Image (cartoon, rainbow, N blue to C red):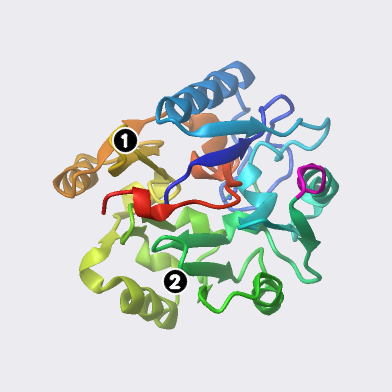
């Protein structure tokens, strides 16, 4: 996946107050709000430096998780499928994201079943493939609704079952990078789902991350293009030297952007952005 035009939400009201919305939210440590703001601002700068257009949705008081814009919706061409949150404290975000996309003239939809947007919906292969996760937050039933709304024969949609509650959104354990590589934590998936991934990517293009990299949220990274339109910059929280070496050999360069405060809520760099590109000409990018 390449990101060209994204949406972010300032962490003005960000906090971790809902115990166990996911298994990372242990609330043993308070969020350092200043540090969180600086980490988010640094992420924004790093993204903008890669020539990505960033728009902002206004944060809303009491919606402490709204900073995780990835969960607001899933965008494909001019369609915005706004999330129907499974997470009770996040349900009011739906209205905010609906209004945002409706006012920006996206064809705006909401699904009936639980669906948590781009957190459980990731594109790969020049947006020819869409991977939808289910198991913890997004329901399997919503996948058919998404498919019917997108209604595009050229888009191959795959359902992946998540089997480990630590990796509760697909974007915590599956990260398409460049055009045909993927960072992946295999312990997060059922066998059947893993084979679906191998089948499309080919096993040699699947970069398996270690337990340590998974815990550092390496699979919640952002893959961006360089100045010369080669796709090679990856922005994530932290990477082991082993993973850096692997990525370096595949011509990716790494930016580490400390996201410690957001990890307390179960999210990292990728959770803080939502791809809102209406249409993208992938042919201008070198493979
Ligand atoms: N605390 C948030 C939640 O549980 C974290 C969301 C992370 N977002 C993501 N796309 N993985 O909803």
Q: Residues within 10 Å of mark 2 (few under 14, many from 20)?
A: many
Residue at figure coordinates x 35%, y 31% from the top left: 256
Q: Position of residue 228 (x, y in %)?
A: 28, 35
Asked whether mark 2 and ligand 1 are closer than 8 Å, the reply comes as no
Residue 40 among magenta residues: no
Magenta stretch, residue numbers? 100-105
Residue at figure coordinates x 57%, y 32% from the top left: 54
**Do the CB atoms of the residues marked 2 and 1 lie less than 8 Å apart?**
no
- Mark-to-mark CA distance, 2 and 1: 31 Å
Query: Based on the displayed image, in which of its 4 quarters is residue 55 positioned?
Result: top right
Q: Which of 214 and 181 lies nearest the eye of the viewer? A: 181
Q: Position of residue 97 (x, y in %)?
A: 77, 46
Dot label at residue 226: 1
Residue at figure coordinates x 60%, y 51% from the top left: 278
Look at the image and tell me whether residue 193 can be seen. Answer: yes
Query: Based on the displayed image, in which of its 4 quarters is residue 239 positioned?
Result: top left
Residue at figure coordinates x 48%, y 32% from the top left: 259
Task: Answer with left or right where residue 136 lies relative to residue 180.
Answer: right
Residue denoted by label 2 = 189
């Amino acid at each position: 996946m390449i990101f060209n035009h994204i949406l972010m939400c300032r962490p003005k009201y960000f906090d971790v107050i809902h115990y166990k919305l996911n298994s990372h939210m242990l609330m043993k440590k308070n969020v350092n709000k200043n540090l969180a703001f600086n980490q988010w601002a640094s992420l924004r700068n790093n993204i903008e430096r890669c020539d990505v257009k960033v728009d902002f949705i206004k944060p809303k008081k009491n919606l402490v998780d709204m900073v995780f814009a990835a969960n607001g919706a899933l965008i494909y061409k001019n369609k915005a499928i706004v999330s129907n949150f499974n997470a009770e404290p996040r349900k009011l975000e739906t209205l905010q994201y609906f209004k945002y996309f409706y006012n920006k003239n996206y064809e705006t939809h909401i699904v009936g079943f639980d669906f948590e947007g781009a957190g459980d919906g990731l594109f790969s292969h020049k947006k020819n493939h869409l991977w939808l996760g289910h198991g913890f937050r997004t329901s399997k039933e919503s996948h058919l609704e998404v498919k019917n709304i997108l209604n595009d024969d050229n888009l191959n949609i795959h359902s992946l079952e998540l089997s480990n509650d630590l990796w509760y959104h697909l974007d915590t354990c599956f990260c398409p990078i460049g055009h045909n590589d993927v960072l992946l934590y295999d312990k997060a998936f059922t066998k059947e789902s893993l084979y679906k991934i191998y089948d499309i990517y080919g096993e040699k293009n699947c970069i398996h991350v270690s337990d340590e990299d998974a815990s550092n949220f390496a699979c919640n990274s952002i893959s961006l293009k360089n100045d010369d339109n080669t796709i090679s910059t990856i922005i994530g929280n932290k990477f082991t030297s082993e993973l850096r070496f692997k990525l370096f050999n595949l011509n990716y360069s790494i930016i580490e952007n400390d996201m410690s405060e957001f990890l307390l809520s179960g999210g990292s760099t990728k959770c803080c952005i939502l791809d809102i590109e209406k249409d993208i000409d992938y042919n201008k990018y070198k493979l």
